[in-house]
Every structure is written in C-alpha cells, then in structure tokens.
Amino acid sequence: MKKIIFLLLGLLAFANVNAQILDPVKWTTKIEKKSENTYLLTFDGVIEKEWHMYSQYTPDGGPLALEVVFKNAKGNFSMIGKAKESKTRTAYNDIFEVNETFFERKAQIQQEIKVTNPKITKIDAELNYQVCKEVCINLEKKFSFVIPVSETTAVVAADTKTEKLAIETPAVVDTVVAASPEPNLGNSDVLEAKTTNETIAAPAVDSKRGLWSIFFFAFLGGLAALMTPCVFPMIPMTVSFFTKQSKNKAAGIRNAIIYGIAIIVIYVMLGFLVTWVFGADALNALSTNVWFNILFFVLLVVFAASFLGAFEIMLPNSWANKVDSQADRGGMIGILFMALALAIVSFSCTGPIVGTLLVEAASKGGIAPIVGMFGFSLALALPFMLFAMFPGWLNSLPKSGGWLNTVKVVLGFLELALAFKFLSNADLVLQLHLLEREVFLAIWIAIFGTLALYLFGKITLPHDSPLTHISVGRLMMGLLVLTFTVYLIPGLWGAPLKLISAFPPTMEYSESPFGVGGSGNASETVALPDGAKSGPHGLVVFDDYEKGLAYAQKVNKPIMLDFTGYACVNCRKMENNVWSEATVLKLLKNEIVLISLYVDDKRDLPKDQQFISKTTGSTIETVGDKWTDFMISKYKTNTQPLYVLTDLEGNSLNLSIPTISYVPVAEYQSWLSAGIANFKK
C-alpha cells in the first residue's frame, strides 16, 4: 500500500514539474544622454503579482542579490556610482537569519555611465537576479544599449536569448518529484516547479515575525532593566510622588499614565533617531559589514564589563541636574522632564541594555530599532503606571538589596556571550578561521560555566553584598545555567547543538569537522579521497561529478546526487533537520557516495568547456550553469533540493520515485534504503 501511495505522489509531482517555464519579470530599457559623454541607463521591470525580486542590498549569506554587470566596460566607459533602485521592501528570513530586501510589482534600476571611448556604439549589460513566489528562479538577462547620436532617448527591449535559471522548491511538508522518462521541453526556456502542499508564509509575514521577535526580546530587556539597582528603587519613590502631589486619586493616576507614555516616547524617539540617521535599509547593510560587526563586539564587551562592575557608564551629572530642575515646574512639562530624568539617572543600568537592543535591532534593519525601543520602554513604563493605579501593590514588591546587583551581573555575562556572535560574523566574512566552532563553543562554555559558579556563590564581584547563603531561586537559576553549560560540551565532539544552531559557526567551519579528537570509528579521521571535502555533519562530499563517480566505482557504492545551492533555503533545512538524524546520517556516511552539485556556483568554466545547451539554448559559462543544464537535460527539472540515487552507470535506483526533494525524515530514509537495497541486488 505504501509503495502505491509513493508511486501516486511521484506521478502527481511529475505532472506538476513538467510544465512551461516561468518568466515573472518583463523588462524594457532606455538610454538618456545627460551631457556630452555621460548617459543614464534605465531598466524598468514589471513583476507579476505575488512574485518578488531581490535587491542589490540583500546581504551576503541570504538569497541571491541583484547584480548589474557590464562586460564591455574596460577601455570604453566607467560607472558613476552604484546603480540606483526604486522603492523596495524588507522582510526577515529566519532560515538565513538576514533581512531580505526586494521589489514587488515594479522595479527600476538606473546606472549612470561616463563614456571614455568615443568610438563605442553600444553598451552590453546584464542583470543577474533571483525572483521568488512559491518557487525561486535565478535569472540572467542580457541587454544592448545603442548609444544615441542625438539628444533623443533610445528605448531598447530586453534581449532574452541567453537566460540562465534555477528553481528552488518552497518549504513544504511533503513533496515528491518524479522525473519524466522522456524529454519534453519543446520551445520552453524554463521549467515550472509546483508542489502538492502549502508553501511557507509570504515575505510580509516573515517581516512581521521578525519584528515581533524583536519586540518580544526588547520587552524582556525592559523587564530586566526594571530589576537593576538604578531603576527598581525608583518605582515606589515615583509612585509615592504622584499619589502625594496629586489633588486626588484620579489626578495621580492620570499623571502616572502621562509619565509612562513620556518614557515610551523618549525611547521610541531614540529608536527613530537611529533609523533616521543610518536609514532603514542601510542598517541591515551595516550589520553585515565586517568593521561594524567588530565595533558591535567591542561595544558589547564594554557594556558587559560595566555590568560586571569594572566601571559605570554614566551621562554627565550636569545633564541630570538641568533636567531635574525642569521637573520641579509641575504640570505636563514637569512630568515629561521627570521621565527624561529617569532615562538619564538610570543610564548606567539601562544604557548597556538599550545599546545591546539597538545593536541587535540594527542587524535586522528596517524599523526594527523603533519596534525594539517601543518594546523596551513599554516594559519599563508599565509598572510605574500600574502601581500608581493600585498603590497597594507596592507592599508586594521585594525589598531592594544585593539581588539587584546579581541581576546586573547575569546580564553582563549574557552580553559578553552575545558579543562573540558579532566577532564570529566578522571572522566568517573574512574567512580568517580565528574563531572556529570549537573556539566559539569553548568561550561560551567558559562564560556560562563561570556564571554558574557565580550563581552558586563561589565567585564574587566588586559590587556584591556579603553572601552567607543563596536563595532557592538563585540555586534553581544556577542549575539551569549549569545544565546549559553541560549541554554545550558535546558540541566540541561534533554534537549538532540544535538549541543554539543560529549562534556558533557551522560544523564545516571548524578545526576538525568530526569534533575535537574525532568521533565514531577511526576511518572517519583518515585523509579525504582526492577531490572530496568535508560536508555537513562530517560527511565526505564531492562537488565534481567525474571525481565522485570515479571514487564510487573504486569503492563500489551507489551515488547520491545532491542538486543544491548556496542560497537554497530548503537545502539547508534538509541538511540540518533530516541529514542530522542518526538513521539517515548512518546511511549517508556508510552506504553511498555523496556528490553535491551547486547550481548557483558562479565560478567561470574554462573557455574550452563552455557551450550552448542543446536543451535550453542557454550559454553555459559557469560551474552552476553546467549543473543546472545537467539537471534539466537528465532529470527534466531544476528544483532544489533534488536528490537522485544512481548506480555506477548513472541509472536511477528508485524506479517508482527516481528523484526526491523536500520530505520528512521517514520518507527520506525509506527512499534511501530502497535505492541502496536495489544497488546490492
């Protein structure tokens, strides 16, 4: 029965895959003469409804960013600045953990150039971009601009003869793709990939999800700030002031609410100022910059040192005195200045938290700093308003004491741990290998291990009160931190550590892909075969088909072709969530030869290896083009991820389901086992 279901799913998927190719963006271009030797090139794109195309400013490590390429520029003309874009949107991608910047419905790209060769008659340009809806397509469009001989504007249509693409399947729950037994491309340029299930949320939903997470963590940051020695004692003092100075209870409540709103306005204005100074889109670009990541690291280390008691970060006393004098004026103005006085006086405690939140929000880009400051200030302001409405609650507040400094110290340790995430980002971009996975985990183990000792009372810091015993709450928190520390330790030996997968470098970016001292049997630590490299979870991976085939013939094992992409979301999901399962990983390590072919590999092929595709008519110039053409010509699809099990002659080992894509663990393991069993017959 199960085989019949698999076969039906495969046939249904095949019917969807073998469809006409999508071309969701229609282009027109024009060239305008601006002066004697300067011209403005304009690309106008109309994007089909529900599709979106990624901007030049989508950061590295995420989806493919748009590129404007001029191949005949040398000696003929030069670009004046970077290409300008029309309005874009930004949304958070929780797989790549970056903000995507993209166009919807319309896109305009303008590039100004200066002609240096008066004999040149045309300008050859290319747009390389990725467009997505339920699938993602990588496209390359070529254009020729004829330089006008008069002051008139020349309008040119897109030359679409050469068009390269790759389609990525959406994140679905259960999708099986079957290859057609016979080619049926006709005159199509591209294949359309559809699935039998619901797709992931649209970008707008991802954007909201990212902002909600910023708001939530900022709100927690505000609650933490309340528990610091600079803020907590001010709650009863401030509430008492409103209740005593107001003519009646209603006036006291009203003034307290105005006070809370004023606190929110002050911090939201700070978030707005950060966004306005840097620009909503520029914030995300800055967050991916090496030097800004290093700056963020230094800032967080300084904040952590302040919380640990090395020094206090304070604003000038003169500021507090001037604001405090204005607060005595009374009325609405006086209340506003009281709120500003709270922000200034409590800065030594709230400053590091606010700074950390702004740094983290900046890494998300857009209006995240404004949302973050709203969440922080809301948590900070609510107690002042609520206790003014219900003064009796003040009796339930714990008394101030040494526990307030403990809160500061815990926050200091957390900020110190977070700081190394930004340093790791810089190291990854520069590929210095100074902060590889083992070093990162060792630092975190040291930080959280020391925090556990502190909570157990074995370590004291400068501003701690004498400790004769620890409370039950402190003991429980110490046990929680110690448990987390112990959880991190196996990561040194190759454990995936899924709870913190977004923080440390990947397994591949390590001193040893098998963990410290190696793991498993001794054969895993021997030298890699010729042409192979270490892949996810320590797998031996070939990225060249011929070399992988030669090795498979040598060891007499079946081949699994993994058609993947560096910017493929579902490929990373499969590797992280399916390949990591013990039963699947055992099969991948011991029973097959894995060949991963990256369809978005931009390395140029040698000139003598470049060709025109017999299937699509496209010019095959890069390594990625070669593997994309291989997918289309051999398996009649170009969805990623795509997995194929073959024998040593290239024949499929799973006749009912020749290819498979994004599926749960059970289906993937069953498909693998069936193919391996067929090879051994």
Image (cartoon, rainbow, N blue to C red):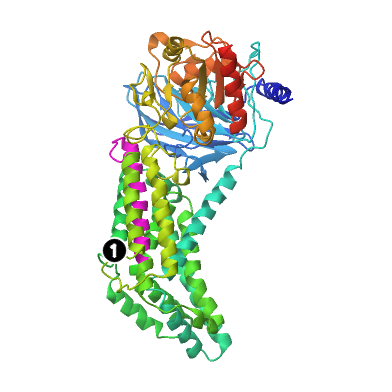
Magenta residue check for 660? no
Residue 532 percent across, percent down from the top left? 38, 20
Query: Looking at the rendering, in which quadrant would you find the N terminus?
Result: top right
Q: Which residue is under mark 1?
A: 459
Range covered by the magenta-colored residues: 408-435
Report which quarter residue 236 is drawn in.
Answer: bottom left
Q: Along the horizontal axis of the image, is 176 left or right of 299?
A: right
In depth, the one of 499 and 242 nearer the eye is 499
Kindly tell me whether residue 76 is visible in this rendering. yes
Q: Disc 1 marks which amino acid?
A: Ile
The location of residue 127, given as percent across then percent down, is 48, 27
Residue pictured at 35% horizontal, 47% vertical: 422
- Residue visible at 43% across and 23% down in the picture: 541
Question: What predominant SS class does the magenta segment belong to?
Answer: helix
Looking at the picture, how far across and down is residue 27, in whole percent?
56, 28
Residue 517 left/right relative to 246: left
